[in-house]
Image (cartoon, rainbow, N blue to C red):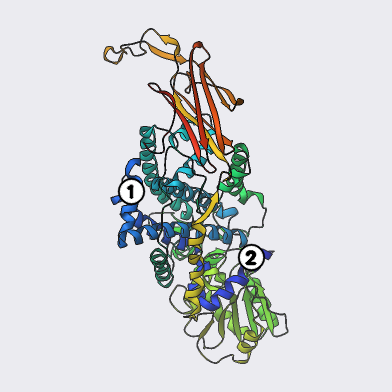
Amino acid sequence: MELVSVSSTYRLMQRISYALSGIYSSKLNPIYYLGAITVFLLVIDVLSGVYLFIFYDVDPKGAYQSVENISSSFLGSVMRGIHRYSSDGLILFAVLHMLHMIFTDRFRMFRWVAWVSGVGTLLIFIVIGLSGYLLVWDERAQLTGLLTAKFFSVVPIFGHALMSAFLGTDIKNLGGLFRILLFGHIAVTILLVFTLWVHVMRISRPRLFPPKYLMVLLTVYTVGMAILFPAKSDPPADLGKVPFEMSLDWFYLTGFPLFKVLPLSANWAVFLGFFGLLTVFPWLIKGRRNPPARVIEDRCEGCRQCFEDCPYEAIYMRRVNEKEEKAFVMESKCAGCGICVASCNYGANEIDTVPYGEILSELEEKRPKVLVFRCPFSARVKERENLLIKTLPCTGAVNTVWFKEFLKYAEGVLLISCDGPDCYFREGVEWTEERFLGKRRPRFPKSLEGGRVMILEAPSTAKVEDKVEEFINSLGEGDRVRIVAKNRLNPVLAPLVLAVPFLSFYPLTTDKMEFYPTDKAIAVVTFKYRSSPVKKAEKAFSKLEHMKAVQNIAVERSPIEVVFVVDGRELLRKVYNPRGMRKDSAIYVYEEFLIEPGRHTFELTLRETANPKKVVHFTLNRQLERKTSLAITFDEDRGFFPIGEHF
């Protein structure tokens, strides 16, 4: 029966991973713990965020200064840096984890729940990062807010309302938005607990944290970056002008450069297309699935070992009478690894891809010198007369109980597995080694003489002929069971290699990028306007006396027409409708215009379409320099006026 095979991308990843195992050892290889590293950095991020929250002023008037006050002390600066770099790190390692899952084909079929929840978690990471940057309230926050608001302005429920919050005089509107952002920043972080639970819900014993050695290195590098390259703010935000550029964080603002080259509708298409494609990705690529295991109920003694060993919680125990419970397989969850076959002392677990009886019959007939078991993802061995080679779904499917029979007809047994924690079925290598070392049931029989069994951790890209020959020549010598793996840590190279991604954080979060042409000026019309009612309700809608309105209620307001003329040239003539389902709410207007530097005459006219006599006209003559902006807003008492530099 044909098994799941190793792809070309998997071989590429194995080549990279195996090289790193030579530096870190297979047990500490960071590639095998990318998801766990992400979770660990998330914990650091949350803890440092709690510290910053204690001293943060949510009022936009004091937000920037409160962040600067935090940064003015050594501890505050370090904590802010830790928060910044751990946030960047968790995005980087989350993306690497996702790519690793794609390259090693661990995102489809029985793994689809983990994949889809992982995509959702990545999106939540980005939302948290964006809201965190907005709360700093510097020019990066203001421009990020403007660009994000433009993105959402395509959605009718938002329109121009969000953009007006980041440029104008309505500080109360911005203050309310800040409180929502802070609440959302915290609430969405809590939501992560749920998405991460879903992410690992079908996995037994998930690796939530990396080994201690890696945790120490990650902590040292995060703190070191915070000390050497303190996180700094851009200049403070100014509601009276548009920032032309900002420091771009490529980890969280990756898609923002697209705003420079694509219309908003195209940006939505890219956003929805990208995350939509990621979500349905497991169903776009067809693949082979190993057949599921099964339990022979009459043989099952209810020992629970297969239930405990299953890497994907595909086995459950069901009570069949008052005194007995037996194991049953959920085929929808079963990965077809065969690990449960190796867990049973009584031969109650079976799978078609591990035909013990056929293997034993062939072994008895051919009587090779060495019986070789390998998985499809491990190194290949050349066929020869003195070897009988059998490929199983996982070397973790080889039951130690069988060795009393195997070693009657072969001088030795060689198991070639994946590279330790890189096991395609997660725990096959670990459980196999523990059983042969007597740490897990069923244990390797003590009565068998030593030196006849070897476990060789070697991926498909490794060359193992020398190791195989060495084992054949040394049969009967040495330990009862030899385990050959890359288990030496290079104390010099290991810290240096992991430091590389952290050193990239500073340049990738301080890169200046222009979002408006710096040889131009910008004129912005931004205001909130409550137009005259065109329909009124004569009575309040409530039947309760104390809830009735004193005055008639407007149930529909007039649209407005806005005309903007610069130097006699009409740049805008547009009708804006009131917001709300009944068109009874205020109208928000936000429009930008690139202007050549120099002195210009600006004319702005507002007219209510349902009340043509209600007209507001404004004229201004102003010198604009390159890389400067003019923002014109409206107030019921003052009419139209240019926003000052400070207010």
- On screen, residue 460 above or below 325: below
User: Residue 259's image quarter?
Assistant: top right
Q: Position of residue 416 (x, y in %)?
A: 60, 76
Task: Residue lying at the far top in this picture: please name it.
Answer: 538
Q: Nearer the viewer, mark 1 or mark 2?
A: 1
Q: Position of residue 562 (x, y in %)?
A: 54, 22
Q: Position of residue 573 (x, y in %)?
A: 59, 23
Q: Look at label 2 and name its amino acid.
A: Tyr
The answer to whether residue 154 is seen in the rendering is no
Give the numbered dot on residue 10.
Answer: 2
Q: Residues within 10 Å of mark 1 (few under 14, many from 20)?
A: some
Name which residue lies at 47% across and 51% down.
Answer: 125
The answer to whether residue 333 is seen in the rendering is yes
Q: Look at label 1 and name its amino acid.
A: Gln
User: Residue 571's image quarter?
Assistant: top right
Q: Quadrant of the C terminus?
A: top left
**Local secondary structure at mark 1:** helix
Q: Circle 1 is placed at which residue position?
A: 65
Which one is nearer the viewer's eye here, 151 or 541?
151
